[in-house]
Amino acid sequence: MSAGVLDREQLGHLRHWDNLSRQWPNDWSLMQGKGTSQDDFGGYRFQLAYMVYALALTHRHRLPAAPGVFRPTMQRLIEKLLLPEVWLYWRDVSRGGSVFNAHLVDQLHEEWDPVIRDNIMYSAYVQSCALLHDHLFADDRYAAPGALTFRHWSFFWGGGEKRFAYDRDSLTEHLYWQMVENGYLGVACEPNCVFQICNQPAILGFRLHDLIHGGSRADEVIAGYEKAWADFGRLDDNGHYAMMMLSDTRAVRPNEAPSPWVDAWCGALMTMWNRDFVHRHYPSQVAAFLVPGDDGALSVRSAPAREVMGQPVVIDSCDTGWVTAWASEMGDRDTLERLLAHADRRMGPTWRGGGLYYPRNDTPTDAHGRRTDIEPMSGNVLLGYARLNVPDGLWGLYQQPWSPEHHEEPAIVEVDRDVEVSRAEVVDGVLHARLRRETAVPGDGRVTLGRLPGGARLRLDGVEVSAPDGVLTVPDGPAVDLVAAPGTTP
């Protein structure tokens, strides 16, 4: 059974992600944050990847019989994830020079291949997004040789084309051996910096790879990871997640201040394989970050801005979005609803092209001191992710995968752009869906039904209809309920 009928806001987030996926290559409208060079936590790679994750969660838990809603959008987002504008930051970051690796610059060099070493904050997202697609749709699209190819060529600089060809399996194999060679502590993001957070998506990727190919590589990596970190502890002395470890000294950096994004991001992901641990520590951790409002809503308290090397650190922390996503995964409905209430009242929810998002706002607070700033990662992605997720959503995706029989059930396999699908599930062999045509969006108003049993009978709002070759035209007007039953009157 699914988690019910999607409401207007949830449908709006899905539409917004679809709209962003359709922007022309290198049109990053609405997606540029405060940081420069795609270095920080609001970079394009994170926005694209977590749109894919949110779509995967929505398909798995809310619209399981509507692969046609999700598959094309996920493919377009993954295509964007491979664009050089997303990963070219690595050419510079790979050389080091930050406070955590400046002493290693004589050992480092400019690296064009964005997944060959370190950079798990990108490579694991490419890996896990490709595997999410192929697992959810029983497809081998990203198994083809070169299906995940990173290429760059400029007429103006750089010489010949840079081309690095991978696929879901070769990339998974490469990340696995990086894990092994690092003693299962994890793979670095920036040189010398092994973040707990950024190694969680790779574990998801290993699990999905096991589901497709068999084996237990994810269990092996988790066992090794647990043993390796046992000497250091996942939490710092104040009960917050340790932010990262320095590869050369094995020194663990605590969650200073603390910063909400560290606990929230790590907790929201690690729960997929370590649920009891994450749930046990969640109440005390999240309490440190919540600010009650005078209207019953909640906002998030960020850590003070830092200064390093005499320079202010300008980044998108994404604190609001990550704490909200964390609350959704934890099933903390009260906190989730109150955080979303604050966003809806103070952060300018906006409808564009039928899609809902919260536009970037760099102003910290309103005249009453209530938080108003929001960055694209939270406003485009994470608040929608939280609104569409279900309690233990990522855990369920990881621990309770669909059986092969799921892909034999009736489903909506193609959906025109102007059709909203707010329900799609199979109950006792009968497909139930709710459809509405959005006339303000271009399209022909059609859906295609697949895997229907012979002699299936279709009804729209109780009236029997035909669908030649499975193609059904959705009428204008309010949403209609579709029932497709095998051979008998529904």
Image (cartoon, rainbow, N blue to C red):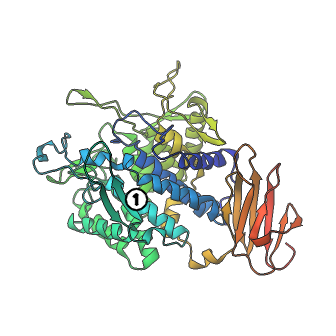
Specify whether 470 is left or right of 164: right
> 18 and 215: which one is in front?
18
Residue placed at 33% from the left, 52% from the top? 152
Residue 279 at x, y = what percent?
Answer: 45, 55
Q: Is residue 169 visible?
A: yes
Residue 397 at x, y = what percent?
Answer: 51, 65
Give the answer, above or below, for where 134 lies relative to 188.
below
Q: How many marks?
A: 1
Residue placed at 58% from the left, 31% from the top? 348
Residue 16 at x, y = what percent?
Answer: 59, 45
Residue lying furthest right: 463
Residue that carries the numbered disc 1 in the rendered image = 126
Specify whether 416 is left or right of 37: right
Q: Quadrant of residue 37?
A: top left
The quarter in which the N terminus is drawn is bottom right
Specify whether 278 is left or right of 241: right
Specify whether 353 is left or right of 360: right
The quarter in which the C terminus is drawn is bottom right
Give the answer, above or below, for where 195 lies relative to 226.
above
Q: Quadrant of residue 411?
A: bottom right
Label 1 environment density (alpha carbons within 10 Å; few <14, some 14–19, many ≥20) = many
Secondary element at image label 1: helix
Residue placed at 87% from the left, 74% from the top? 489
Q: Is residue 330 visible?
A: no
Residue lying furthest front: 155
Q: What amino acid is at disc 1?
A: Val
Residue placed at 60% from the left, 34% from the top? 349
Residue lying furthest top: 367
